[in-house]
Amino acid sequence: MVVITGEGHRCAEDCGGPPGWQDLKDSFAKTKGGDKERKEWYKRMCSNGDKKGLNPYEWDILSINAELADIKV
């Protein structure tokens, strides 16, 4: 299986559904401020978070297809 098109960062696990995902993206999109607790949760505790933070507009077809290739079916 491969991905041929898409957009945006994959959704964070356990972020509170669509409204929580939007809040998290908004927190990282703001240059100053944002919800610091949510940012730290994503960086340190979210099961698919990233220590570097969240770029809500990032989408990397090569890394996504590499992850899919590692899945054992």
Image (tube, rainbow, N blue to C red):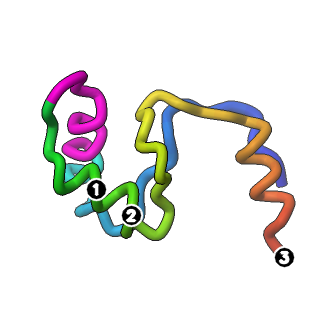
Task: Please tell me the numbered disc located at residue 4.
Answer: none
Sequence-wise first label, 3 or 2: 2
Q: Which part of the image, by quadrant, shows the C terminus?
A: bottom right
Which stretch is magenta? 22-32
Q: Position of residue 48 (x, y in %)?
A: 50, 62
Q: Position of residue 55 (x, y in %)?
A: 44, 33
Q: Residues within 10 Å of mark 1 (few under 14, many from 20)?
A: some
Mark 3 vs mark 2: in front? 2
In the picture as drawn, the residue positioned furthest to the top comes out as: 31
- At horizontal 29% and vertical 61% (from top left) the residue drawn is 41
Q: Position of residue 23 (x, y in %)?
A: 19, 44
Q: Give the main secondary structure of the magenta stretch.
A: helix
Task: Please tell me the numbered disc located at residue 40.
Answer: 1
31 or 56, nearer to the observer: 31
Q: Which part of the image, by quadrant, shows the N terminus?
A: bottom right
Residues marked 3 and 1 touching at CB (< 8 Å):
no
Q: CA distance from mark 3 to mark 1?
A: 32 Å
Task: Please tell me the numbered disc located at residue 44.
Answer: 2
Report the residue marked by disc 3: 72
- At horizontal 15% and vertical 37% (from top left) the residue drawn is 34
Give, as a three-letter code, the residue at label 1.
Glu
Give, as a three-letter code, the residue at label 3.
Lys
Q: CA distance from mark 3 to mark 2?
A: 27 Å
Instruction: Indicate yes or no whether the magenta region holds residue 42.
Output: no
Give, as a three-letter code, the residue at label 2.
Arg
55 or 68, nearer to the observer: 55
